[in-house]
Structures are given as structure tokens and as C-alpha cells.
Image: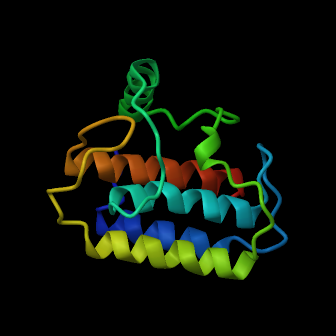
Amino acid sequence: MKSFFEQQTYEELRARLQQIESSAQPEWGKMNAAQMFQHCQYPIQTALGKDKFNMKPNWIVKLLFKKMMYSEKPFKRNAPTPKVFQATDNYDFSSEKEKLDQWMQELWYDRDNEDRRPHPVFGHFTKDQWGTLQWKHLDHHFRQFGV
């Protein structure tokens, strides 16, 4: 399975991000592109230990999520998003796109970090698990906008 921490995959993700135009319409879901950019920053901030979310572990979510994460299948369309990760405000497209790119770069530069804090909901991840999670999430939302 691909990983955000593989150079070719990282470069592909950044190139796909740049292909998303302000006029892009989602193929599914309710978010516009700027909201999607904002939403995609959250898991990266979590991986970097810079999130500001107060979430409690949930064993049912953990069990279901880990099964999805290890599956070769992409995340399902229209899967529910936890309220804390929903981006529903009006955001500036260019600003949020640039912020997402910057967060992606920061995580790439931190890719060899083997001492990440546990995920606030799902617990301990290995470096490979963090890389897979980031790739699957970004891939899911970039496909949502046709790239």
C-alpha cells in the first residue's frame, strides 16, 4: 500500500493538490474545495502533534477504522466525518490550499520521526501506519475533487 512517506507518493500528492482549481466541484460529499483543504489539514496536524482537538478514544470507531486503514480499498464515499473534523465555514480557497501544502511539506520533513505521540482516538501508530493513513485520507479527498 502507498505511504505519504514514500518520495514518489508524496510528490504525486503535491502535484494532485496543485491540479485542484477554485471552480472544482466535488464528485460526492458536501464540502467545497476550500473546506476540503481545511479538513485535510487536521490529520496532518495530528501526526505532527500540533492538533487542538479534544477527542476521546472510542473502541468501536477504533476497530472499524483500523480495518479500513489496512484494507487496499479506498475509503468509502460519503463516510461520516466526526463533528470535530468537519469544515463548514467559508474559507479562502488560495489560502487553505497553500496551508495544506505547507502542512504536507512539514510532515514530509518530519517523515523519519519514529516517536510520534499516540493518535488521540486510535492510539499508537507505527511510522508505516501514519504514512498509510495520510496517503489514504489525502487520496480520498483528492479523488473527491477529480484528481
Q: Quadrant of residue 108?
A: bottom left
**Residue occupying image coordinates x 74% and y 75%:** 93
Q: Position of residue 28 (x, y in %)?
A: 77, 43
Q: Quadrant of residue 47?
A: bottom left
Q: Is residue 147 visible?
A: no
Q: Position of residue 20 (x, y in %)?
A: 69, 70
Instruction: Indicate left or right for 113 with 17 as reference.
Output: left
**What residue occupies the far left of the structure in this picture?**
114
Q: Quadrant of the N terminus?
A: top left
Q: Is residue 128 visible?
A: yes
Q: Nearer the viewer, residue 61 or 74?
A: 61
**What residue occupies the far front of the structure in this picture?**
54
Q: Position of residue 81 (x, y in %)?
A: 63, 38
In the image, is residue 126 above or below residue 122? Answer: below
Instruction: Indicate left or right for 140 with 27 as reference.
Output: left
**Residue occupying image coordinates x 58% and y 48%:** 140
Figure disc tally:
0
**Residue occupying image coordinates x 28% and y 76%:** 109
Model colouring: rainbow
Q: Nearer the viewer, residue 108 or 42?
A: 42
**Residue occupying image coordinates x 46% and y 58%:** 52
Q: Quadrant of the C terminus?
A: bottom right
In the image, is residue 44 above or below residue 27? Answer: below
